[in-house]
Amino acid sequence: MMVATAAACGDSGGDGAAGGGDDAIVLGFSQVGAESGWRTANTKSVQDSAKEAGITLQFADAQQKQENQIKAIRNFIAQQVDVIAFSPVVESGWDTVLKEAKDADIPVILTDRAVDSADETLYETFIGSDFVKEGRLSGEWLVQEFADNPGPVKIVELEGTTGSAPANDRKQGFGEAIAADPKFEIIASQTGEFTRAKGKEVMEAFLQAHKDIDVLFAHNDDMGLGAIEAIEAAGLVPGQDITIITIDAVRDGMQALADGKINFIAECSPLLGPQLMELVKQVHAGETVPKRVVTEETTFTQEQAKEALPTREY
Ligand code: GYE
């Protein structure tokens, strides 16, 4: 749809020029923020691979606020960058600004998180994980692990950023998996905003309100790591008194898993940079790209974490 104008820029693709020469592709990238270890690794991956690909990166940090992302995108449009990529902090409320980019003939790539726009022509492609699957795999592990437990199994949940695709989808996938047996009961669920500090704070409140928590499901490692501090401060043993499941598998999470403080992690890869740069080049050249690119991921038990840690990239 944007083929004609995108191809009309007629540049050479900026071969080899680290940071880009005059004719390098300019990519405007609006990042969510710096809320977690995952995000730090993701930012590094995007910056390193842009450099490697000779793409000039205009990087904007939205500090977890949608209004900042909308401003950044409008800025990119005003600057007439070649391609816009962004990781939408929440799912809804993007149609107007995406329409503005489309009217300016600037192709948009969604990275990491999805939008709920009904009009799929507002973006070229979406590259990122299957968050529902991550939640489901977490729930399925729990169902298996507690197969011989007569129940009730009391679960507390630390949700990610309210309204974000990973929070919505991980909750859904986990909920579907544990619905397999009515003995599983989510007794409290609240946002910890994907941060360690908030994860700790909310877990403290959970521990005060409930004396009989069996399981913690945290939508990311960082909130789980914050919660571990609260659990230890309450005189309980994380990984034993409370079974802990998280998502991401960043280094600190994997270390806690190997140390026995977390019991299971569903991986979510932040290393989206290289594939993103390929897609940027393709849409800039007017090539057709798949509408959805799903990241490959696995899961880790404590034993598997011990094996994987020495060669873990992030
Ligand atoms: O799981 C979390 C981060 O959008 C997949 O955002 C990402 C999530 C990730 O803050 O740690």
Image (cartoon, rainbow, N blue to C red):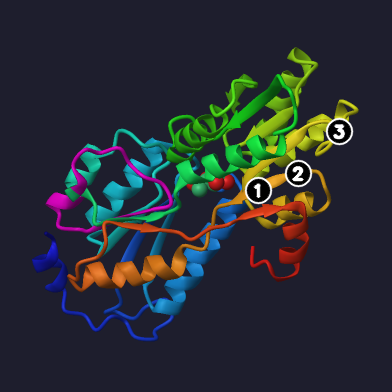
What amino acid type should be assigned to the residue bearing mark 2? Ile
- From mark 1 to mark 3, how far is it between C-alphas? 20 Å
The outermost residue toward the top is 209
Q: Is residue 14 above or below residue 212?
A: below
Q: Say above or below: 216 vs 255.
A: above
Give how far across and how far down residue 179 sits, in percent: 54, 27
Query: In terms of depth relative to the viewer, which is nearer, 195 or 287?
Result: 287
**Visible residue check, residue 11:** yes
Q: In the rendered view, tell whether residue 176 sits above or below residue 105.
A: above
CB within 8 Å, label 2 to label 1: yes
Q: Which residue is mark 2?
A: 262
**Which residue is the site of mark 3?**
232
Tell me which amino acid carries mark 1: Ile
Range drawn in magenta? 101-120
Mark 3 surroundings: few (<14), some (14-19) or many (≥20) residues within 10 A: few
How would you classify the magenta stretch by its main secondary structure? loop
